[in-house]
Image (cartoon, rainbow, N blue to C red):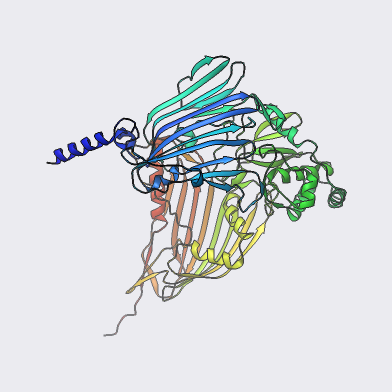
Amino acid sequence: MRKLCVLLVLCVMLVQARAGDEYAVFLIDPALKKNSNVVKRVDDRQFVLKNPGEAWFKRKYVLTVFNEKGDEQAEFTQLYNKFIEIRSIEGSLYDAFGKELKRVKNKDIQDLSGVDDNSLMDDSRYKSHSFYYKVYPYTVCYEVELKYNGTMFYPEWFPQSRSLMGVEESRFDFSCPENYEFRYKAFRYDKDPVVTRDKGTKTYTWQVKNLPAFIGEPYSPGIRQLAPLVLFGPTEFEMQGYKGNMRNWQDLGKFIYSLKQGRDELPADVKQAVHQLTDQLSDPSEKVKALYGYLQQNTRYISIQLGIGGWQPFDAKFVAAKKYGDCKALSNYMYALLKEAGIPSNYTVIKAGEGEEDIFSDFPSSQFNHVILSVPLSRDTLWLECTDQFRAPGYMGGFTGNREALVIDENGGRLVRTPAYKMQDNLQVRNIKAVLGDDGTLRAQVTGRYTGMQQDELQWTLHRFTKEKMKEQLHEQFDFATYEVEQFGYKENRGVLPEIDESLTITVSNYATITGRRLFIVPNVMTRSSQKLTADSTRKYEVQLTMEYRDVDTVVIDLPKGYEVEALPKDVMVTSPFGRYYSAVKLADNQLVYYRTMERFSGRYPASQYGELVKFYETIHKADRNRVVLVKNEPLKAF
C-alpha cells in the first residue's frame, strides 16, 4: 500500500512538472539536498568589458529554499551608485512543483538609502525585494543587468559562498576585447577556463556542477579558503576620468597616491597649532603622539562614500573646517599634520575587521576596505588608526593587526604586514581575594589586568558606555546564578601595547553548596572555559587558531571556621599542540588557594589533530569546574 501511495505521488508530480517547469523540486539530485538549507539551481553570470572605463554585468540565479534558515538568501539586494547603474530587474516565485506563483513588479522593489547611522554623505543606494513566502520548499529566480561606469572593481565568482548550500550549476563568462590583458586567479578550481573568440572579443568561461553542501566546522579556515573561488582584476582601468593600472601592487599604489595628491594643504590656524604642539619636542615619536592626540580631540569619524568609488579622500582643509571625516579623509589629515611637523608618513590601505580573512597577496586587486597611516621612525614603524578617538597611538589590535597592508608613497605601493600580537602581549591576569560566609555567600575583591587584544572589547565599552550601562553589562558577564557587583573601576594605560586595570567587588549568593556537614565549592571563581567541542571522526578541514593568549588566575578564599578537607582535586596539567593548561588547589591556614594558567597557541593544524583539540578543551572544561569537598568538624558529645 505504501509503495502504491509513493507511486501515485510521483505520478502526480510528473504530471504537474510538465514542459517548462524545470524548477520542480523533485528534479534536484537528492545528494544536493542533503544538509542544504538552499540549493542553487542556476547561477549564470556574464561580465562584458567594453573598454577600460565601461563594463556590463548580467546575472541570473535560481534558488530553492527548503526551510526558514534559507529565507535570507532568497531576498534580492543590489547596490547602485554613480559607478554602478541598474538597467533592469526581473524576478519570479515558484512553488515546489515549479509552477510560477508571482512575478516581480516595479512597485514591489524597495529603493533604500545606503546611508547608515555612521554615514553623513553616501551616494550609494540599494534595490531590495522579497516575496515573503513561507511554504517550503519554494524557488525564486532573479535576473539583474548592471552597467559599470568605471572598472577598478570586477565582480568575483564564488559559486558556493556559504555552508549548507548545494549547487546544481554555476557559470561565469568574462568577455573583453581581444587585445585587452585581464588577470584572474583561481582557488580550489583545478581546470583551465574554456576560451572562445568571436569578432575581436575573447570570452573565458568557468563552470561547476553538482557541488554538495558542506557543513561548517569549528575552528576551520575562513569560507573563502574552503570553496571554489575565482578573482578577477584589471590591468588598465579608469574611474571618473582617473586612469590607472593594476598589474602589480606598485602600480595600484601609484593610482591611489594620485587620488590624494594636492589634498594635504592645511589652513593657517591648524599649521600654527601643529608648531605649538611640536616645536618644543625633540623626539619624533613624541611629536607623532602629540599630533595624534590633536587629531582625536578635534575630529570624529563619519562615513563619506563619495569620490572615486569611495577611494578619494576629502582634502585636509575640509576636515579642519568640518571636524569630521571618513578613514580616508582622517588619515590624509593626519598625514598633513605630520608633514607640517616635518615627519614623513605613508597613507596605507588595508582590509580591516575583527576576524576578517587576509587578502590574497599574490593577486594585486582592490581587496581593501579601510585606510590607516604608517609612520616610519628610526627604530620602528608607528601605526595609526585615525578613525578611533580613544585608541592608543601605535596599537592596531584585532581590527587591523597581523595582516597585509598596502603602504603607499610617491613610488607606488608595497605590501607589508601590520604588527602581530603574541601570547605575551595578550594577557588576562586576575587576583581574587574572597571570604566565604557560613550561608555559602562569597564576597570577592577582584583585581585584574588586561593587555593587548584581551583588552580590546573592554576598551571599546569603556569609552562608549555610561557607568550604568557598564554595570548592566557586568551583571550579565559572569557565570554565577545570582550576584551583585557592588563596586567597579577601571584605569586605562595607553601605549603601543595598551593595558586596562580592573577592580571589582562582587557578592555571589549561594556560591557554595552546603549539604548537612559538607560544603562543596568550586575554587575557580571567575575564569571557567565554556568551550566544549563535539568529536568528529570525519573532520575535513584544517584547524585554524588565530589569537594567542595567556590567562593567569590566583584565588585565595577565606573559609568559615570549623571545616577540614574531605576531597581535594588533583593538580591538572595539560600540554598539547594547541596550548598548555595547569591548575592546582590547596588548603592552608583555613584558606583555599587556587592557581590556574591557560595558554593558547596560534597556528594551522591538520584535520587529523581535531580529536586532540576536542580532548584539550574537554579536559579544561572539566578541570575548571572541579570542586573541593569540606566537612565540618563537630565537637565530641559527652557520655
Picture coordinates of residue 363 (x, y %)?
Answer: 59, 27
Dividing the picture into quadrants, the one containing residue 9 is: top left
- Residue 600 visible: no
Above or below: residue 532 compared with residue 507 = above
Above or below: residue 210 compared with residue 276 = above
Viewer-nearest residue: 302 or 306: 306
Q: Residue at x 56, y 17 (%)?
A: 201
Viewer-nearest residue: 109 or 175: 109
Q: Residue at x 51, y 26 (%)?
A: 186
Above or below: residue 88 compared with residue 277 = above
Viewer-nearest residue: 502 or 630: 502
Picture coordinates of residue 56 (x, y %)?
Answer: 57, 29
Q: Residue at x 41, y 32 (%)?
A: 42
Picture coordinates of residue 29 (x, y %)?
Answer: 31, 32
Quarter of the N terminus within the rendering: top left
Viewer-nearest residue: 32 or 488: 32
Above or below: residue 411 compared with residue 450 = above
Q: Residue at x 50, y 48 (%)?
A: 599
Picture coordinates of residue 372 (x, y %)?
Answer: 68, 42
Quarter of the C terminus within the rendering: bottom left
Outermost residue toward the bottom in this view: 639
Dividing the picture into quadrants, the one containing residue 219 is: top left
- Residue 637 visible: yes
Left or right, 96 with respect to 233, comes to: left
